[in-house]
Amino acid sequence: MSKSNSSAHVKKQVAISWLRLAWKSLQNRRLATMLTVVSMMLSLLLLMVVDRIQRAAQDGFTQTVSGVDLIVGARSSPLQLILYSVFNLGQATQNVSIESYNEIKNRPDVEWTIPYSLGDGHRGFRVVATNTDFFKYYKYRSHENIQFQQGHVFEGYFDVVIGADVASTLGYQLGSPVVVAHGATTGESLQKHEDKPFRVVGILQPTGTPLDRALYISLEAMEAIHLDWQTGSAPAYGKEIAVNQITPEMVAPRTITSFFLRTKNRIETLKLQRWINEYKEEPLLAAVPGVVLSELWQSLSTIEKILKAISFLVMIVGLMSMLIALMTSLNERRREMAILRALGASLKHVLGLILLETFILSTLAVVLACGFKILIEVFLGAWLQARFGLYLQAPRFSFNEWSYIVLMLFSALLISFIPALRAMRSALKDGLSLKL
């Protein structure tokens, strides 16, 4: 064996010996070691989980509707248009005439449209009138299609498709009767379309989006239930229009609340948006949903900053617990340091031992935190999506999470210099004999 190989072998053996010594020293303080590792692990895990949930919430919020280039409604503000069209919050100031809708729909640069009519509700849930293009083209999150848990798309005038939250909250199943309330989108209403009840024909899969909290009927159905409500109130007894009297001409839509559209060429989107905003026949507004949703999320960034600040404080608490554990053990370890000095260990070795122990503690904490993070994403991902709308993609580590891991390791080693330097001074003062 050459001299260089022999020297490398000796250094390797020395490193292994010091690693074993550090591990034995930590095992000798098993309880304090376990508590320190758990504290550091929980602080890092909390920081990564908060970051992961924040990104999932942002993705879920900004991608509530996906693959839509423009949302068009009566002229108001882009935020108001997005809120009542996407999140079913609030009311439209005006409706869009069916003539304007058809003109825009038939433009050569428009690929497809989804009409939307709002106004009624059912036991606190919004009723949305649309057509079958909604189930064909509407996408959410990463271009995911609407899926049925049970049943099928509405076919008759009085068929209704319900979201997953509606079904679970109200206990509805296929065939359950539904009576729509007139002009009520929250709570109960005294005015109901009791003479024209609906029947549940489909239940949607949970999406974790506002899709889960709405009922969907056809545009013709929305017109049908309002045929005899022209004065804005229920018809007098005996003046109701019976279901068997309804003809297709009577329920042809005349207005809609808003509509989604996608252009054939993304380059034409802004040009079409400007054309709609300057539409001469009636005042319309076209908004790019992705832009509006991103701006809205940025306005809520204060909450995100507060959560991150709390997480960093928890990490600091974890690091302080490590520092306290090392500092409180120093007096008990003075005899250990004296023995090491007697065996030929230098002050640098004492410093290295403390740093090595810190590295082991922080590494164990990082490994455990990463392991628990992956388990949370694997086993709780589906539940978080269905319950809170948080879509966790396949387990992976973002740049931020890697930064937190490096920060934890670096901060732990940096803080450990405090007890390490104190241990060096104690070892130098005590020398080879310790007087207790």
Image: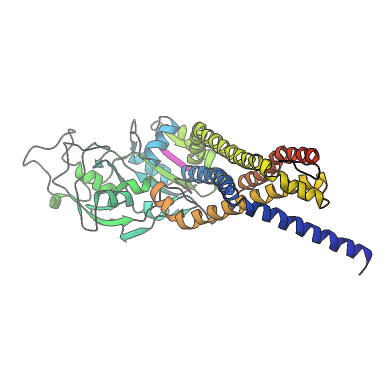
**What is the x, y in percent for residue 267?**
57, 44
Residue most toward the bottom? 1
> Can residue 108 be seen in the rendering of this structure?
no
Q: Residue at x 40, y 49 (%)?
A: 208
Instruction: Identify the residue at image location x=62%, y=42%.
Output: 325
Q: In this view, does 362 lie above or below 307?
A: below
How is the protein colored in the picture? rainbow
The image shows residue 283 at horizontal and vertical percentages of 40, 30
Relative to the observer, which residue lies in front, 189 or 287? 189
Point out the stretch of residues depicted in magenta.
Answer: 66-73
Q: Residue 347 falls in which quadrant of the image?
A: top right
Please state which of residues 85 and 52 is positioned toward the viewer in this rendering: 52
Quadrant holding the C terminus: top right
Q: Does the magenta stretch include residue 380?
A: no
**Vertical placement of residue 317 versus 374, above or below:** above
The image quadrant where one finds the N terminus is bottom right
Q: Which residue is drawn at 62% across and 50% down?
A: 29
Which x, y percent locates residue 62?
A: 49, 42
- Residue 271 position in % (x across, y down): 53, 38
Name the foreground residue: 238 vs 268. 238
Q: Is residue 284 left or right of residue 176?
A: right
- How many labels were placed on the picture? 0
Q: In this view of the protein, can residue 344 be seen by the observer? A: yes
Relative to 13, 91 lies left or right: left
Question: Which quarter of the figure has residue 426?
Answer: top right
